[in-house]
Amino acid sequence: MIYLDYSATTPVLDEVLDTFCKVSKNFVGNPNSLHKLGIDAKQLIEQSTKQIASILGVKEKEVIYTSGSSESNNLAIKGICQKYQNRGKHIITTKLEHSSIYGPVGYLMKEGFEVDFVPLNKEGMVDIEKLVQMIRKDTILISIAAVNSEIGLRQNVEKIGEILKEYPTCFFHVDATQCIGKDILLLENIDLLSFSGHKIYGLKGIGALIKKEKIELEPIIHGGKSTTKYRSGTPDAPLIASLAKALRLSYEHLQENYLYVQKLNEELIRFFDSYKNVSVNHNSHCLPHILNISIIGVKPETFQHALEEFDIYVSTQSACSSSSNSSAVLAFTGSEKKASSSIRISLSAFTKASEINSLKKAFDICYQRLV
């Protein structure tokens, strides 16, 4: 099997799974219990939180555990807007976001909130000058993904956050699901940040929302003691410990892994450039871990299943998208043809050179047969 869908989910590392299993067996107490077993589990969670906070450069009290990025995004967006709606009901986002951004934003529109989409420049980057012009007195939230999940565009959220310091009543949320563990991300000027364990070789069902300590949120899950007042429910010590382990491992060789993936990416771009009906939807602002191509005239699911015959697995677009066309590719290229025929290849430090060679051979066979 050749797995090239790492942006959808990653296989769990043995070390991470081992941590989960050991904690599950050895820390059986409810972290909310006052007896020794409960205290032991609570202390383990506190140690894990300290490690996560240290890696990301935030305070321990700023870490809120969730079930994953979708919940983190919902908590950030609904939590801010419901808590501070007395200040205004204006939200700004982009057309490059994940469905777990559009979902809560759409919900809030029904509740009377107004949403504007900031324009992108010709390279697919947020037009920062126009973003500033769009900010109003009643703008309470700006949500921009650090890395788009379909094309890999890496927005300069650090610069945007620096500029937004001049607007203290407007909060800045960053969905960093496709960035954490792949690229260095500075959180100093980001108010809220979402990420998930299963994108960094951790387990599904655990993620976090980083929230600066002076910011309040209206919870979306009420009742039951937890690690913070913003997300009720019995804390899951095994999952939390495994998240800390996955995050630590993802940062150990981050720069070395980045350069390795970049070489694989460049090799594939050179390969795809030789095909007349293939458009490489990629530029210098994209992380190398995501390579989006359009095979003009062929339905993406057709080509996807053709590659599957060779035991090669890629994605047609974001795994959580319900649309037949890629809105991100459309926003990036302006082409309906490219948006309706795009395939996403997700690379990893675990991707082997031999797997890339196998992909190229299989791709050529499929291309000759289908185009």
Image (cartoon, rainbow, N blue to C red):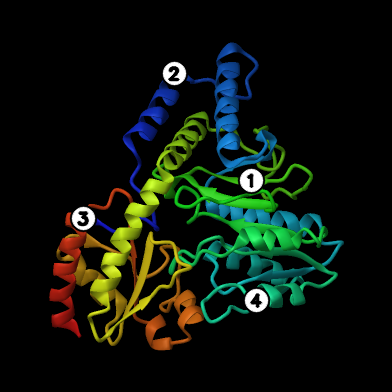
The extreme top residue here reads 36
What amino acid does circle 1 point to?
Ile
Disc 2 packing (10 Å; few <14; some 14–19; many ≥20): few
Residues under numbered marks 2 and 4 in contact, where contact means CB atoms less than 8 Å apart: no
> Residue at left 47%, top 30%?
238
Whole-percent x, y for residue 254 in the image? 43, 45
- Say which quadrant the N terminus sits in: bottom left
Disc 1: which residue: 210
Residues under numbered marks 3 and 1 in contact, where contact means CB atoms less than 8 Å apart: no
Q: Earlier in the sequence, mark 2 or mark 1?
A: 2
Q: In this view, does 273 lie to the left or right of 7?
A: left
Disc 4: which residue: 117
Q: Which of marks 2 and 3 is nearer the N terminus?
A: 2
Q: In this view, does 230 lie above or below 154?
A: above
Q: Which of marks 1 and 4 is nearer the N terminus?
A: 4
Q: In this view, does 301 lie to the left or right of 310?
A: right
Residues under numbered marks 1 and 4 in contact, where contact means CB atoms less than 8 Å apart: no
Whole-percent x, y for residue 45 in the image? 57, 27
> Residue at left 72%, top 54%?
79
What amino acid does circle 2 point to?
Asn
Disc 2: which residue: 26
Q: Mark 2 or 4, which is nearer the eye?
A: 4
Disc 3: which residue: 353
> Residue at left 65%, top 67%?
105
